[in-house]
Amino acid sequence: MIDFSLSEEQKACQKLVRDFARNEIAPIAHEMDEEQRHNPEIVEKYYKIGLLHYAVPEEYGGAGLGSLEGCIIGEEVGAACAGVAACLGGNILGLTPFLIAGSPELKEELLTQHTSGPNLGAFCLTEADAGSDVAALRTTAVFEGDEYIINGCKRFITNGGVASLYSVFAKEDPELGHKGISAFMVPADTPGVSSGKKEDKMGQRATDTREVMFDNVRIPARYRLGEGLDGFKIAMMTLDDSRPGVGAAAVGIARAALEAARDYAKERVQFGKPIAAQQGIQFMLADMAMKVNAARLLCWHAAWLHDNGKKNTLESAISKCFAGDIAMEVTTDAVQILGGYGYMKEYPVEKYMRDAKLHQIFEGTNQIQRLVIARQILS
Ligand SMILES: Cc1cc2nc3c(=O)[nH]c(=O)nc-3n(C[C@H](O)[C@H](O)[C@H](O)COP(=O)(O)OP(=O)(O)OC[C@H]3O[C@@H](n4cnc5c(N)ncnc54)[C@H](O)[C@@H]3O)c2cc1C
């Protein structure tokens, strides 16, 4: 039997985050976008309502929520401002390798400290010459005494300049290719860690995106993650976990665009009647609604698999890819329905369209998702 209803706790979580997103984020989304401003006050308020570290188990100071709650949260925050969703989601992404592969002792030491305040994490995988081709990364980790020394430069890191804890992927044994990659937790205040200039982005401008540099950064050997797990595997498991939530944020953008287009179509009069009375516009709105609903179900299914201990590599890639693609289509159609007004910054839909584009690029481009999907169905 399939039950699509949310539990009372999930409904309460949805209401909490929806109210927060509508009251605290949406009213200043335009301003943050214009000023390309990361907003620490939002992070602090979000921390105070108990959601910043939602995926961290309660014993380490988090809310202990699952992937499905992550989708509910991602959609609501994404609908208010996708840039803020990327910042808040970037924290969970940065912590996920730690949740997957950190020892209880290290979690007690670093994670409990992280969750004791409005601190952000960041996930440092991408490099200048290693984007889709993760195995090409050049950051090195050399074991010396009881420490690792990390050298390298990570690019396009969400929360790059504002995080206090990084998960970092580096080559411990370059001879072994992707199997030689290891994962480490690196506190941002470790000597030798620095961040570059803020990237000037097309969309999701409320997120701080930067290079992060590691120059002879010495960390204790116990900060290496994953007994018996290589870092590449940890990175791929992290992305399996995070993609449904990223897809859900894209659903949020698409939902917001659909609602804006629907409301506008009911008001805008041309040829003596609202444009919503034109079948051509109705069909566009119907297609947009179908896409939003289908994407949400795909994200929830992938998250449900994860929460029930089932492998979700295929469904996770499908959800992220489909939701990212439909967010681009739906937001483009929303701009079309608003006509010339849709192209103006005075209306929200042009921002939705710029924000949506990133969902076809980050967390593995949608071409890479198609490679993952094809590999899964062919194997
Ligand atoms: C705003 C933003 C935030 C980001 N945040 C983070 C972060 O927090 N942490 C992090 O580690 N990374 C982050 N990234 C990096 C992101 O994950 C990469 O940009 C992405 O994986 C693509 O890598 P690339 O940009 O080097 O593109 P490339 O890998 O150079 O790809 C260029 C094009 O070629 C295509 N392509 C590449 N290989 C293939 C193939 N085998 N088959 C078909 N097509 C292919 C790609 O799909 C793409 O269209 C972020 C990026 C952006 C823009």
Image: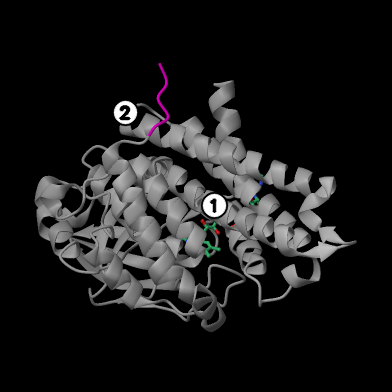
Q: Residue at x 44, y 36 (%)?
A: 300
Q: Is mark 2 within 8 Å of ligand 1?
A: no
Q: Residue at x 59, y 44 (%)?
A: 292
- Residue 239 appears anywhere in the view: yes
Amino acid type of the residue tagged 2 in the rendering: Asn
Locate residue 9, reporting x and y percent. 26, 42
Quadrant position of ligand 1: bottom right
Mark 1 in CB contact with mark 2 (< 8 angstroms):
no
Report the residue marked by disc 2: 308
User: Which of 214 and 71 lies nearest the eye of the viewer?
Assistant: 71
Amino acid type of the residue tagged 1 in the rendering: Ala
Locate residue 72, reporting x and y percent. 40, 47
Q: Secondary structure at mark 2?
A: loop
Q: Is residue 357 left or right of residue 266?
A: left
The quadrant of the picture occupied by the N terminus is top left
- The kind of secondary structure the magenta stretch mainly shows is loop
The quadrant of the picture occupied by the C terminus is top right
Locate residue 313, reporting x and y percent. 46, 33
Q: Which residues are magenta?
A: 1-5
Q: Secondary structure at mark 1?
A: helix
Disc sitting over residue 203 in the figure: none
Report the residue marked by disc 1: 250
N-terminal of the pair, mark 1 or mark 2, is 1
Q: Is mark 1 within 8 Å of ligand 1?
A: no
Corner quadrant of residue 228 = top left
Corner quadrant of residue 43 = bottom left
